[in-house]
Image (spheres, rainbow, N blue to C red):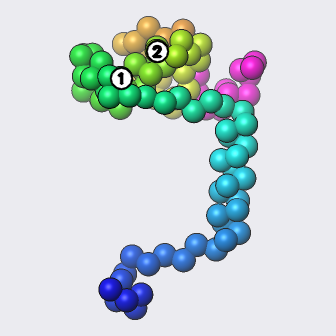
Amino acid sequence: MTASTNKNNIFVDTNVLIGAWAIVHYLLSKFTVLSFTDKDIEDSLGIEGTDMEDNIQYVISREFNCLHFTTNNKKDYNRFYILNIIAPTQIRVIKR
């Protein structure tokens, strides 16, 4: 398929990519990205509730003993015992 017939071609200015890299680099310098396994997904299937994404996030945060859980959907996590649920705007108050 040539560029002229592919309607999904997207041009991304390298300045945008550099900006995105800078943001990702900054976030990685401030936060730890948690990994997960097939077992975490299997464990999440055993939790009551219909939102699999919430269940997976809960399982991973529990596994890593996270003290804070950041989300815009606090109500979705009320059914879990989580030490401290905070909004993204409150991240700055977390002491490292």
Image quadrant containing the C terminus: top right
Q: Earlier in the sequence, mark 1 or mark 2?
A: 1
For residue 63, the mark is 2
Where residue 55 sits in the image (x, y, percent)? 35, 23
Contact check, label 1 and label 2, Cβ < 8 Å: yes
Specify whether 84 is left or right of 21. Answer: left
For residue 89, the mark is none
Where residue 48 sits in the image (x, y, percent)? 24, 16
Neighbor class of circle 1 (other Cα within 10 Å; few <14, some 14-19, many 20+) is some
Residue 8 seen: yes
Magenta residue span: 86-96
Q: Circle 1 — which element?
A: helix
Q: Nearer the viewer, residue 58 or 35?
A: 35
Query: In the rendered structure, which amino acid carries the disc numbered 2?
Result: Glu
Specify whether 95 is left or right of 88. Answer: right
Specify whether 95 is left or right of 68. Answer: right
Query: In the rendered structure, which amino acid carries the disc numbered 1?
Result: Asp
Q: For residue 54: magenta?
A: no
- Residue at 42%, 87% in the rendered image: 3
- Residue at 46%, 14% in the rendered image: 62
Q: Nearer the viewer, residue 89 or 95?
A: 95
Neighbor class of circle 2 (other Cα within 10 Å; few <14, some 14-19, many 20+) is few
On screen, 92 above or below 4?
above
Q: For residue 95: magenta?
A: yes
Where residue 91 sits in the image (x, y, percent)? 67, 28
- Residue at 54%, 12% in the rendered image: 65
On screen, 14 above or below 20?
below
| Image quadrant in which you'd find residue 66 | top right
3D distance between C-alphas at marks 1 and 2:
9 Å
For residue 40, the mark is 1
- Residue at 57%, 33% in the rendered image: 33
Where residue 85 sits in the image (x, y, percent)? 54, 18
